[in-house]
Amino acid sequence: MAIRRYEPWTLFNELSKELSRIYEGQPGTDSSSLATSDWVPAVDIREESEHYLIDADLPGVRPGDIEINMENGMLIIKGTREAQSRESGPDYKRTERSGGAFYRRFSLPDTADAERISARSDLGVLQVTIPKQEKLQPRRIKVEG
């Protein structure tokens, strides 16, 4: 008999995460994802010295089914994932992977260089690289008197 550690908060934490995902569209969050999506991919966003990186989990999505647009300071990632054909029956105990359209949008900072954004997809992870604009050197202004 295996000994299992009992952690009473595990179920509560899982419930809290699910509720957060359901109510993601509350004021103060990006509700556009929920209104126009069948599912919402999870993302990680990080800032490095030369660029910003967005990693989006898109398992089962072909690169050709992903569309990325940059408009008015907003980066929009959208596309579709084919739904798995499932027959209802006793074999399925739980189904969480959905198919259909997805949509995420991100407001970019003024330091982002929209002209040099690039993206690549590898092993179900989309990585969008957003370079920062080169820093302008301060210009000294001579005061005449």
Image (cartoon, helix red, strand yellow):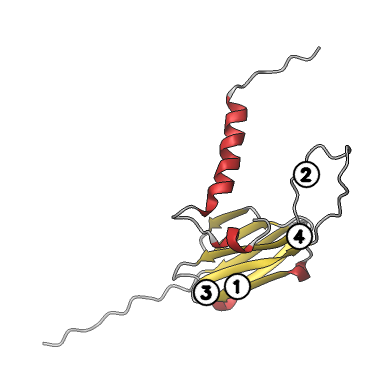
The residue that label 2 is drawn on is 95
Choose between 77 and 84: the one closer to the eye.
84
The residue that label 4 is drawn on is 122
Residues at marks 2 and 4 touching, judged by CB atoms closer than 8 Å: no
Please report whichever mark, 3 or 2, sits nearer to the chain's N-terminal start. 2
Gap in angstroms between the C-alphas marked 3 and 1: 7 Å
In the structure shown, which secondary structural element does the residue marked by tag 1 occupy?
loop
Residues at marks 3 and 1 touching, judged by CB atoms closer than 8 Å: yes
In the structure shown, which secondary structural element does the residue marked by tag 3 occupy?
loop
Q: Identity of the amino acid at label 3?
A: Asp
Residue 61 lies, in percent from the top left, at: 77, 61
Q: On residue 113, which mark appears?
A: 3
Gap in angstroms between the C-alphas marked 3 and 2: 40 Å
Is residue 20 rendered to the left or right of residue 94? left
Is residue 139 rendered to the left or right of residue 126? left
Q: Which quarter shows the C terminus?
A: bottom left
Which residue is pictured at 67% across the width and 68% down the height? 119
Kindly indicate the quadrant of the structure image that contains residue 103: bottom right
Q: Identity of the amino acid at label 1?
A: Ile
Q: Identity of the amino acid at label 4?
A: Asp
In this view, the residue farthest toward the left is 145
Q: Identity of the amino acid at label 2?
A: Thr
Structural crowding at the residue carrying mark 4, measured as other residues with C-alpha within 10 Å and reported as few (<14), some (14–19) or many (≥20): few
Residue 96 lies, in percent from the top left, at: 74, 45
The residue that label 1 is drawn on is 117
Gap in angstroms between the C-alphas marked 2 and 4: 25 Å
